[in-house]
Image: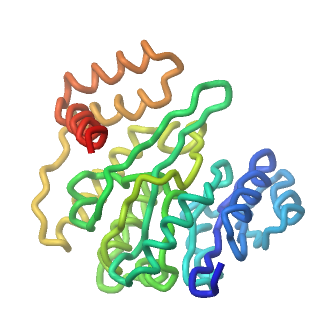
């Protein structure tokens, strides 16, 4: 990989000794120059396992994943950076596609591909984003990031600037912090290009949005309201009915059976039909393209 296309990877890790080595190996296989593991006050052997796998480890008292990411990004010297959770894995082909897209011009703050969701003992789930260009206004209107954090390749300088205030106060929520970061990056550095190449394997087990979907959705709602003001954008506030529909739809992705998944999707549709029918129509269009 050329110097111009060099990228580093930042992995926040807390008690991740069972998964961090696989995450690091996937980053190096994808072509990462340096993998930074921010050991966030782990009480297990996370730091030792990460060093053994070739990562550069920085240990700190527990501050949370968002603070760990911010600290890790400040260490990055490569032109591009990927933020990878300790239980996720990068896919080289998708990362290379994102780098190629970003190397073609400077108008995008980042590029992102699709994901494969996985849970041990269950069939993989395809996470297909809507392909095209996603602006900050697009993200705020929809209220969610198009793909999991590991699917993004960001311009390092732009991401560091997005983490500063630059006249727009940060919320720094405990939940949905990846959504806020995507909004800020696209506000300050340009839109995000989204493609269909699989860029990451994403763990569907144990994440904050999985464990506490209601809190995650409510945080996203607060982020929408906050940033719509700075974008001079009118967005409809989510009602309790809208929030409940989104919670059910997110829970459907974790359902252990097909019947359970269908029931949750149906319940979500009865509360907000557009939330379910919109993506279905898009998939039909994509299949015909």
Name the residue located 56 percent from the left edge and 63 percent from the top edge.
95
Front residue of this view, candidates 18 and 277 = 277
| Residue 76 appears in view | yes
Colour setup of the view:
rainbow
Q: Position of residue 114 (x, y in %)?
A: 46, 50
Q: Quadrant of the N terminus?
A: bottom right
Asked if residue 23 is positioned above or below residue 11 in the image, the reply reads above
Where does the image place residue 217, in percent across and percent down from the top left? Answer: 35, 44
Residue 230, horizontal then vertical, whole percent: 20, 74
Q: Residue furthest top?
A: 259
Q: Quadrant of the C terminus?
A: top left
Quadrant in the picture for residue 170: bottom left
Is residue 175 visible in the rendered image? The answer is: no
Residue at x 53%, y 58% (from the top left corner)? 94
Residue drawn at 30 percent across, 85 percent down: 167
Q: Is residue 240 above or below residue 130?
A: above
- Residue occupying image coordinates x 50% and y 29%: 254
Q: Residue furthest left?
A: 234
Give residue 216's position: percent from left, percent from top. Answer: 41, 46
* Image vertical order of residue 76 relative to residue 241, above or below: below
Vertical order, 94 against 285 (above or below)? below
Total numbered badges shown on the rendered structure: 0
């Amino acid at each position: 990989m050329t110097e111009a296309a060099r990228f580093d990877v930042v992995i926040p890790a807390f008690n991740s000794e069972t998964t961090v080595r696989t995450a690091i190996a996937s980053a190096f296989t994808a072509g990462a120059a340096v993998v930074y593991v921010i050991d966030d006050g782990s009480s297990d052997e996370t730091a030792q396992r990460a060093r053994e796998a070739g990562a550069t480890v920085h240990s700190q008292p527990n501050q949370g994943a968002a603070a760990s990411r911010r600290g890790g990004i400040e260490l990055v010297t490569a032109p591009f950076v990927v933020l990878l959770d300790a239980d996720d894995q990068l896919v080289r082909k998708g990362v290379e596609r994102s780098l190629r897209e970003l190397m073609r011009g400077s108008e995008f703050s980042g590029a992102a591909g699709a994901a494969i969701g996985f849970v041990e003992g269950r069939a993989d789930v395809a996470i297909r984003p809507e392909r095209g260009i996603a602006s900050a206004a697009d993200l705020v209107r929809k209220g969610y990031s198009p793909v999991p954090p590991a699917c993004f390749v960001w311009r390092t300088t732009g991401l560091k600037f997005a983490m500063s205030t630059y006249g727009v106060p940060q919320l720094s929520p405990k939940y949905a912090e990846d959504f806020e970061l995507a909004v800020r990056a696209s506000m300050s550095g340009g839109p995000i290009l989204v493609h269909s190449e699989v860029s990451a394997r994403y763990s569907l087990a144990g994440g904050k949005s999985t464990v506490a979907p209601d809190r995650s959705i409510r945080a996203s709602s607060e982020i929408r309201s906050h940033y719509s003001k700075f974008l001079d954008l009118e967005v409809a506030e989510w009602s309790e009915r809208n929030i409940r529909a989104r919670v059910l739809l997110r829970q459907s992705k974790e359902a252990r059976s097909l019947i359970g998944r269908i029931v949750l999707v149906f319940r979500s549709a009865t509360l907000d039909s557009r939330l379910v029918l919109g993506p279905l129509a898009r998939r039909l269009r994509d299949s015909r393209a």
